[in-house]
Image: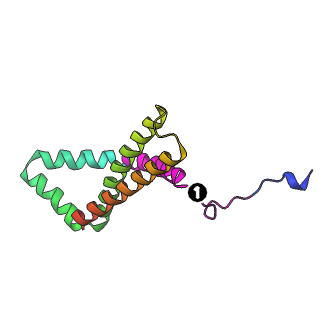
């Protein structure tokens, strides 16, 4: 067996990915986060719409749990990022923004807007 044909270990933490790749990976992660958050969001919505006491319970739950507030901030980021990245990919499918410069600009816009959404959610929830 040829020693040069062995599999090569690629340390993904040392590889510098372009922003387009990071936006793509974040798009997939945000989609998984949104799907996993659906049961909790439906439960909280149902509880808050049942009565005034249910609404007060949901408010108390959010005020008492820092972890829950943090996870809801991430869900807000995921929603904004997933929607904007999805629109970006739809436009790319229509051959709009395919050039290197416009693709890089749209990736920066998606990442920047997602970061602003996270900061706004942090200001509202913390």
Residue at disc 1, secondary structure: loop
Residue at (92% x, 52% y) in the render: 2
Q: Nearer the viewer, residue 124 or 117?
A: 117
Residue at (49% x, 33% y) in the render: 95
The residue at the far right in this view is 1
* Label 1: how many Cα within 10 Å (few below 14, some 14–19, many 20+): few
Residue at (17% x, 48% y) in the render: 47
Judge left or right: residue 34 versus residue 126: right
Where does residue 54 sit, x and y in percent of width and height? 12, 52
Where does residue 75 sit, x and y in percent of width and height? 33, 53
Q: Nearer the viewer, residue 69 or 79?
A: 79
Judge left or right: residue 22 versus residue 91: right
Residues shaded magenta: 9-34
Judge left or right: residue 19 versus residue 53: right
What residue is disc 1 on? 17
Where does residue 15 sit, x and y in percent of width and height? 63, 61
| Residue 86, image quadrant | top left
The residue at the far top in this view is 94
Q: Main secondary structure of the magenta part?
A: helix
Residue at (22% x, 62% y) in the render: 62
Position of residue 107 relative to residue 91, above or below, is: below
Position of residue 107 relative to residue 63, above or below, is: above
Q: Quadrant of the C terminus?
A: bottom left
Residue 71 colored magenta?
Answer: no
């Amino acid at each position: 067996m040829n020693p040069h044909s062995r599999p090569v270990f690629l340390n993904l933490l040392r590889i510098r990915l372009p922003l387009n790749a990071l936006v793509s990976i974040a798009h997939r992660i945000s989609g998984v986060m949104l799907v996993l958050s659906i049961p909790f969001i439906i439960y909280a919505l149902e509880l808050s719409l049942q009565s005034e006491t249910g609404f007060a319970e949901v408010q108390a739950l959010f005020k008492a749990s820092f972890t829950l507030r943090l996870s809801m901030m991430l869900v807000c980021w995921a929603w904004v990022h997933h929607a904007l990245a999805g629109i970006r990919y739809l436009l790319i499918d229509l051959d709009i923004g395919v050039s290197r410069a416009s693709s890089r600009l749209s990736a920066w816009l998606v990442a920047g807007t997602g970061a602003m959404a996270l900061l706004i959610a942090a200001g509202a929830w913390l």
